[in-house]
Amino acid sequence: MLKIALEAVTAIRKKTQDAFDGAGKFDYKPDRSVITQTDLMLETELRDIFTRRSPGVPILGEEFGLEGAEKFESGWVIDPIDGTRAFLYGIPLFSTLIAFVEQGEPVVGVMSFPAISTVVYAAKGEGCWMSVEGKPLRQLKIAENSPERVEQAVMTASGIHSTSYNLADGTIAYNLDSLVKSARDFTFVNDCYQHAMVAAGRLHCAIDTLMKPWDSAAILPCIKEAGGDFCSLDGRREKVMFGGSLISACTPKLLDSAVARMNSFILN
């Protein structure tokens, strides 16, 4: 399934790059998230590829929902453009996300960043890898001496939504301020790119307070195969793609500490 997923992101890369260069037309979904014609076009093409290459396998996508099953447990998960605002506003860190899931747990994950010609991918038991056009394939492995304490860590978040700074579309005001003030360094990084950099060992912890299954699924195998850890912000480590949020970290102790601090307003 990894081979099929890599073929799929390669097949749509040029069209995605061309659309990024001419992006600008968009509309809002009912939840006020942004949708573009490119989202719809790319998901349609990806669905066609998976239908041909793996007939009968269910497909769950952001734009067109579930096809091939009444309830999703196993199959393909697609996000044609993760980071649509980045795509629209000229920030080249948007991605195409593809995962293959077995019984609620992703076993293949591909994060393609077409504007920077980079792909991060993993399959269960096969490691996490980074491909950059024109450079040798590189395995991503988190260092064994990575930080275990927030004060030692470089931490990121994709935004301030559903936090103490701005509840926005969330229902829980996570205490992001506690990490901003105590981390060795803190910055904001677009969507799944921050998790890719955790897998690469460049960042130590990445936080997304609001996530859908298609946002999370491709990330999880990459973090796991690189030697990191992840959970939803309620601390759950099983079926995290359905957890509504995601935090990844280089070590379990750092992960647990960050989760505790993010939930400190709730616990007090």
Image: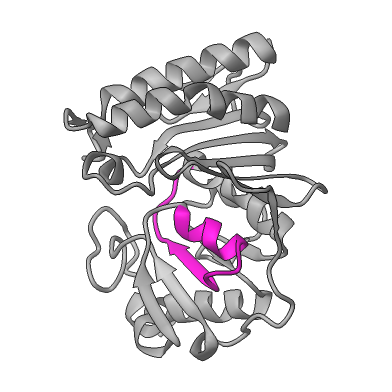
Q: Nearer the viewer, residue 136 or 74?
A: 136
Residue 175 belongs to magenta span = no
Residue 142, picture quadrant? bottom right
Quadrant housing the N terminus: top right
Q: Is residue 63 above or below residue 239?
A: above
Q: Is residue 57 left or right of residue 178?
A: right
Q: Is residue 264 left or right of residue 259?
A: left
Residue 4, picture quadrant? top right
Q: Is residue 49 above or below residue 18?
A: above
Residue shown at 59% from the left, 79% from the top = 254
Query: What range is drawn magenta here?
Result: 193-212
Residue shown at 82% from the left, 48% from the top = 125
Q: Is residue 249 above or below residue 98?
A: below
Residue 203 belongs to magenta span = yes
Q: Nearer the viewer, residue 223 or 106?
A: 223
Q: Nearer the viewer, residue 88 or 136?
A: 136
Residue shown at 61% from the left, 36% from the top = 99
Residue 119 visible somewhere in the drawing: yes
